[in-house]
């Protein structure tokens, strides 16, 4: 556990999916459960998928998307756990392949290498979820100990409503044994 007032530190990773606008729900729920929270976002997610200023206000920390220079201090302590919500097709596949071309992917790969618990709530359309590469990526990441909730497609129900994403499921997955 980090030395953040004796509270564990959670990295929340946000990918570019329409549902990302609700990430504050996960941040608040984690804080209520005693976590300190830092948010990382894919570069695409930083392009209006969620309110970065509101999330920064909730956490008291900047939302990180880019690598820091070696001379800059680390803005977050090491994570005690990571929650990826929403996780996109692209991020899941690149992560499983060991690609680390963004801060998010580098952090996810490092977390797995260090044995940090990781929970993932995918938001992937049915057609993409059926792709063989995606299924193989899920199997590979599960084999590395990554815990998955879902699936969630974001597709409207027959009555036109959208199903709930279930943000707090990530926290439940982190505590499942």
Image (cartoon, helix red, strand yellow):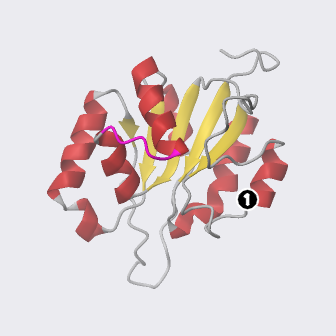
Report the front residue among 108 and 125: 108
Q: Position of residue 171 (x, y in %)?
A: 56, 37
Instruction: Name the outermost residue toward the left.
Output: 132
Q: Quadrant of residue 54?
A: bottom right
Q: Quadrant of residue 155?
A: bottom left
Q: Which residues are magenta?
A: 98-102
Q: Position of residue 83 (x, y in %)?
A: 53, 40
Q: Residue at x 26, y 65 (%)?
A: 128
Residue named by callout 1: 52
103 horizontally vs 122: left or right = right
Identify the secondary structure beneath mark 1. Answer: helix
Quarter of the figure with the C terminus: top left
How many numbered marks does the figure carry?
A: 1
Q: Position of residue 48 (x, y in %)?
A: 65, 70
Q: Is residue 154 magenta?
A: no
17 horizontally vs 141: left or right = right
Q: Is residue 54 visible?
A: yes
Q: Position of residue 116 (x, y in %)?
A: 49, 23
What is the crowding at mark 1: few (fewer than 14 residues within 10 Å), some, or many (at least 20)? many
């Amino acid at each position: 556990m980090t030395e953040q007032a004796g509270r564990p530190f959670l990295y929340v990773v946000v990918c570019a999916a329409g549902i990302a606008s609700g990430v504050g729900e996960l941040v608040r729920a984690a804080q209520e459960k005693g976590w300190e929270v830092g948010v990382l976002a894919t570069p695409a997610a930083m392009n209006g998928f969620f309110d970065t200023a509101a999330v920064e206000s909730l956490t008291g920390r900047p939302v990180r998307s880019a690598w820091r220079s070696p001379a800059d201090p680390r803005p977050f302590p090491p994570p005690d756990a990571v929650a990826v919500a929403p996780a996109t097709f692209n991020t899941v596949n690149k992560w499983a392949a060991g690609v680390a071309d963004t801060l998010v992917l580098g952090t996810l790969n490092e977390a797995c290498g260090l044995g940090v618990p990781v929970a993932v709530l995918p938001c992937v359309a049915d057609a993409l979820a059926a792709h063989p590469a995606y299924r193989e990526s899920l199997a590979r990441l599960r084999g590395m100990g990554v815990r998955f909730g879902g699936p969630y497609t974001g597709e409207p129900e027959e009555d036109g409503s959208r199903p709930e994403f279930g943000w707090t499921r990530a926290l439940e997955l982190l505590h499942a044994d």
